[in-house]
Amino acid sequence: MQKKLFSELGLVPEILKAIERMGFEEASPIQSAAIPVLLEGADVVGQSQTGSGKTAAFGIPAIQCVDASIRAPQVLILCPTRELAVQVAEEIAKLAFFKRGVRELPIYGGQSYERQFKGLHAGAQIIIGTPGRVMDHLERKSLKLDQIKMVILDEADRMLDMGFVDDIKTILRQAPEKRQTVFFSATIPRPIQQLIQTFTHNPVNVRVEAEAMTVPAIEQVYYEVDRRSKLEVLCRLIDLEDVKLAIIFCATKMMVDELTEHLIARGYGADKLHGDMTQAMRERVMGRFRKRKVEFLVATVVAARGLDVDGIDIVFNYDLPHDG
Ligand code: AMP
């Protein structure tokens, strides 16, 4: 798949300016392939991973299609987790920086309804939400989909794994018939295939191989160690490699709790992220991690999947990941 220059993709000057400000030099393969097709109005099924630049691949056409003079939701982006919704919203905000009158709004469970009502009332046009909270707003009639032109499902396979399939169907049925539907998914298992068949029209398939990433190549190493020596080996590696910023994935919340305590007891600046924590706590931890106030983020895969933090030296899989 060819890479192109952003200037070849048919983007409005406001967006080109924002891309330049973000420091992107050329479009990634998924962006080169998906952006022109989306701008033409076709449905797209994109198969790519985090790191391929997929957020901008759907975010740029989403911003471009918004009519800033209409103060109603025009694009709906569904994400599996709150963290991802916030991250996507941040990237959209940067890309929309120079397009006046365009507002994005993340809506997710755990955040106060008041803030979300306000944002919706203020006329946000790009809504980035988790399926559960989007359903809540639809039921409360605080979110209306009648002006929606584009629905994007980000990490569709993950949303399926998390049991959101019925919510997704309900939401898609409520969106106007005449709209663009976009699926982004790392894998396309059969239930996703069925959703694609039901809810898209002649979608264009865009696929990028794992190596076609915007992020540099990743070196992977594993160490075979006795269970009892794991902590020791981890600490040695941290010291040896002079790690300044790392994520450590554990299989369970209990392991996350335990390992965080052990690391702190040994003098490492560690904090944790897992599903039992309140949204406010999670955001606080992520904020501290991004600001380098915490060196080691110990997390369950579900809580931290897809997070994108600049400057990470190493990702440790403290327990073997199940899906390789
Ligand atoms: P994503 O796959 O959307 O999670 O993006 C991964 C990272 O790549 C994010 O930090 C993006 O801001 C960044 N990125 C996206 N597009 C480009 C590009 N064309 N050039 C350089 N970096 C990019």
Image (cartoon, grey):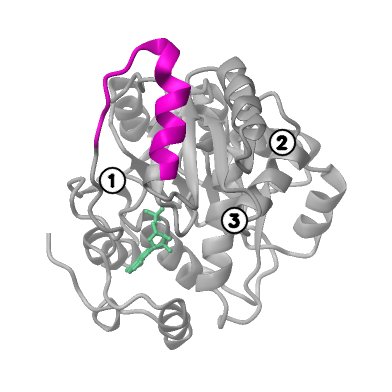
Q: Does the residue labelled 1 lie within 8 Å of ligand 1?
A: yes
Left or right relative to 231: residue 109: right
Q: Are marks 2 and 3 in contact (CB under 8 Å)?
A: no
Residue nearest the viewer, comparing 239 with 170: 239
The relative height of residue 270 versus residue 291 in the rendered view (above or below) is above
Query: Mark 2 belongs to which amino acid?
Result: Gly
Q: Which residue is drawn at 42% across and 20% down?
A: 230
Residue to which mark 2 is pinned: 109
Relative to 157, 136 lies left or right:
right
Q: What stretch is highlighted in magenta?
A: 221-239
Residue type marked 1:
Ser
* Label 2 to label 3: alpha-carbon separation: 22 Å
Label 3 is placed on what type of residue? Arg
Which residue lies most toward the right here? 114
Which residue in the protein does label 1 denote? 48
Task: Give the spatial CA distance, label 3 vs label 1.
Answer: 25 Å
> Where does label 3 land, which residue?
290
Q: Quadrant of the C terminus?
A: top left
How far separated are the C-alphas under marks 1 and 2? 26 Å
Q: Nearer the viewer, residue 124 or 316?
A: 316
Q: Residue at x 68, y 44 (%)?
A: 285
Q: Is residue 68 visible?
A: yes
Location of residue 271 (image quadrant): top right
Circle 3: element type: helix
Which residue appears at 27% of the width and 62% of the height?
A: 37
Q: Marks 2 and 3: which is nearer the front?
A: 3
List x then y, in percent, for residue 113: 83, 43
